[in-house]
Image (cartoon, grey):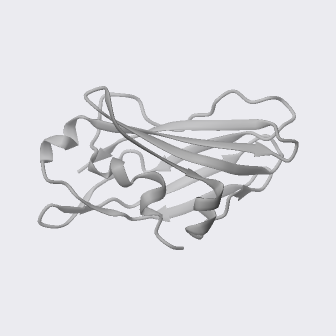
Amino acid sequence: MKRLTALVLLPLIMACASPRAAGTSRDASIPGHGAITMSIQPNPIVARKVSGDTYEFPFDAVVRETGGRAVTINRVSLEVYALGIKVGSEAYDAARIAQLGYSTNVPGNGELRYHLAPTKSVGDDRLFDSVYGEVRVDGSDETGTPTSATTRVTVTR
């Protein structure tokens, strides 16, 4: 699969473990309709030094459908925080996700799994102590019923 550096974590890649909770989460869903969960594996992501101040951040982004109905991913967004202050954000619509070579359709009770290994220069190692990101996936099932999931992402060395 193609690398998806910009889709999920490009601005987050300078992050490190924070004291905030991380893991899979799902927003409320409507019974009988499509529902999704989102996780990053591993979380925290383990940064691997490539050379100098360049690190690689290998991980899998996993979107699971849990309501028994196919869901179309409409948008993926990321907000990056340092010391609790929002320092960046990025969002991609379904057309951009597809243009990058990734499916936007999660089958009922199925999953989409993207293996990613972006690289990023980290000029100041102190950033590894205070940055985290929140990734949100928005979709809808075949009836147009919306569903979304958000997860927190951290990184360690």
Q: What residue is at 36 percent from the left and 28 percent from the top?
A: 20
Q: What residue is at 43 percent from the left and 35 percent from the top?
A: 22
* 20, above or below 7, in the image: above
Q: Position of residue 24 (x, y in %)?
A: 54, 38
Count of numbered badges drawn on the protein: 0
- Relative placement, left or right, of 127 versus 79 is left
Q: Position of residue 155 (x, y in %)?
A: 31, 46
* 4, above or below 27, in the image: below
Q: Position of residue 64 (x, y in %)?
A: 67, 48
Residue 19 sits in quarter: top left
Quadrant including the N terminus? bottom right
Q: Position of residue 15 (x, y in %)?
A: 28, 45
Residue 145 sits in quarter: top right
Q: What residue is at 35 percent from the left and 41 percent from the top?
A: 154
Identify the residue at the far bottom of this view.
1
Q: What residue is at 13 percent from the left and 47 percent from the top?
A: 125
